[in-house]
Image: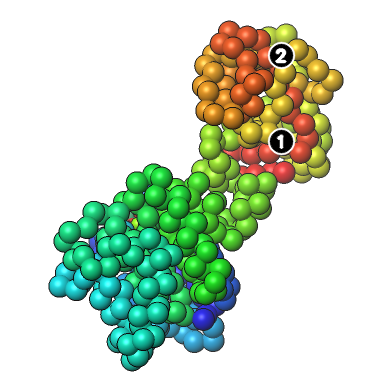
């Protein structure tokens, strides 16, 4: 197994299409890293360069102490499962999964043991004798995944590997992928555009947008300390709310309302150069806002509930704030404490939940 290191990697396609721009990150030996970002951001291009299916335009890719830029996929000993599963059409499911094992000279009984066990883990036992043409897209994708995970590669690279499965199956397969990883400890890089999926499955996230790496970190780090506004709003559902504020002092921000200013303390001091600036974005996550039907002790701002959506244990409220912009924000509350449409509510922003951004950049 290997540690994968990208050093200032670029991919420029003919016609000067910059798909990957100066990207550097490390996936540690045995780690489960997810490359997350919107469609067209350069995720697949990055993965295909790591696999060796796409030439690196500039920069270096290292597997441990070995520079792999010029090595073929075979020499890199990587396994790839991608969105469009290339299964061998003439081989049944069992033989498709067994293929890479046989190619490596495993004995018949070894192959049988491995195929049986991965088929059980990914619920493929009942379809082992079927041909790929007889399978649904979701099943084909699962076979492709089994084939990639079975061969104990140096690195396992998965590109949107569960995108064609039904919603419910997806959650199950996601958990199985993680469990197989925890058993085999294969270094795994998992590409997805789905933030909930990435957050659920990985140790660390590498967030990519418009060909550039925006942040690398654990789910906790990204959630609590997003480096910029893009990351802050991309990870989390519903996304972080943004409200315009003015920095009154290095540790004190205000929101303007018709009835005067509402002041909030910050968790730490901001660079004094921002003091006086009245175009600071205050970011607050819908899940962290404390909402009450009466004005409480903490620093709060009022608003009125416009929409209340019931979602099982929780409800998502769309609230119009009393600020001058009449901002619309989302607040997640336990269903039993859900306010009704038209209610006036008070929302507490405690220092720990406040993020501040100047333009795109986080300043706290
Ligand atoms: P993602 O996987 O994040 O959706 P991709 O890596 O597939 O992103 O694509 C990144 C950008 O590179 C896109 O603008 C895409 O159109 C372009 N692109 C991808 N593959 C090629 C190619 N073979 N030739 C030219 N442009 C490409
Ligand atoms: Mg892609």
The quadrant in which residue 139 appears is: bottom left
**Residue 233 pos. (x, y %):** 54, 40
Write the residue at 64% across / 39% down.
357
Task: Tell me: residue 259, above or below residue 49.
Answer: above
Camera-nearest residue between 21 and 348: 348
Query: Is residue 292 found left or right of 48 in the rendered image?
Result: right
In space, the residues marked 2 and 1 are separated at their CA atoms by: 21 Å
Q: Secondary structure at mark 2?
A: loop
Q: Quadrant of ligand 1?
A: bottom left
> Is residue 27 something that shows in the picture?
no
The residue beneath circle 1 is 354
> Is residue 185 something that shows in the picture?
yes
**Residue 68 pos. (x, y %):** 43, 83
Query: Is residue 250 found left or right of 119 in the rendered image?
Result: right
Residue 221: image tag: none
Camera-nearest residue between 182 and 80: 182
Which of discs 2 and 1 lies nearer the camera? The answer is 2
The residue beneath circle 2 is 293
Q: Earlier in the sequence, mark 2 or mark 1?
A: 2
Write the residue at 30% across / 78% down.
98
Q: Residue furthest right?
A: 297
Query: Is residue 154 found left or right of 90 in the rendered image?
Result: right
Task: Tell me: residue 181, above or below residue 232.
Answer: below
Write the residue at 36% across / 75% down.
115
The quadrant in which residue 90 appears is: bottom left
Query: Is residue 338 found left or right of 124 in the rendered image?
Result: right
**Residue 43 pos. (x, y %):** 40, 59
């Amino acid at each position: 197994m290997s540690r994968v290191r990208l050093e200032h990697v670029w991919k420029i396609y003919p016609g000067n299409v910059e798909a990957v721009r100066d990207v550097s990150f490390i996936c540690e030996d045995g780690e489960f890293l997810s490359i997350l970002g919107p469609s067209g951001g350069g995720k697949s291009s990055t993965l295909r360069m790591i696999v060796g299916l796409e030439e690196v335009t500039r920069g270096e890719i290292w597997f441990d102490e070995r520079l792999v830029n010029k090595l073929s996929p075979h020499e890199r000993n990587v396994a790839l499962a991608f969105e469009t599963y290339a299964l061998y059409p003439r081989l049944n499911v069992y033989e498709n999964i067994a293929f890479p094992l046989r190619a490596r000279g495993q004995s018949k009984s070894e192959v049988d043991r491995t195929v049986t066990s991965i088929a059980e883990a990914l619920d493929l036992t009942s379809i082992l004798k079927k041909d790929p043409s007889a399978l649904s897209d979701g099943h084909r994708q699962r076979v492709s995944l089994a084939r990639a995970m079975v061969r104990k590669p140096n690195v396992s690279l998965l590109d949107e590997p569960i995108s064609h499965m039904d919603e419910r199956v997806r959650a199950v397969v996601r958990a199985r992928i993680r469990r197989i990883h925890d058993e085999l400890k294969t270094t795994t890089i998992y590409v997805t555009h789905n933030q909930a999926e990435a957050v659920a499955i990985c140790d660390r996230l590498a967030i990519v947008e418009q060909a550039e790496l925006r942040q690398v970190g654990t789910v906790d780090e990204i959630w609590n300390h997003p480096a910029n506004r893009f990351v802050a709003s991309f990870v989390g559902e519903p996304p972080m709310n943004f409200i315009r504020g003015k920095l009154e002092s290095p540790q004190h921000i205000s929101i303007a309302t018709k009835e005067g200013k509402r002041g909030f303390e910050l968790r730490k001091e901001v660079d004094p150069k921002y003091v006086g600036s009245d175009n600071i974005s205050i970011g607050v996550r819908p899940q962290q806002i404390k909402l009450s039907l009466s004005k409480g002790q903490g620093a709060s701002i009022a608003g009125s509930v416009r929409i209340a959506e019931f979602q099982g244990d929780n409800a998502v409220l769309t609230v119009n704030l009393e600020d001058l912009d009449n901002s619309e924000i989302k607040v997640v509350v336990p269903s039993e404490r859900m306010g009704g449409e038209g209610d006036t509510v008070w929302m507490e922003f405690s220092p720990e939940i406040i993020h501040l951004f100047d333009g795109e950049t986080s300043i706290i």
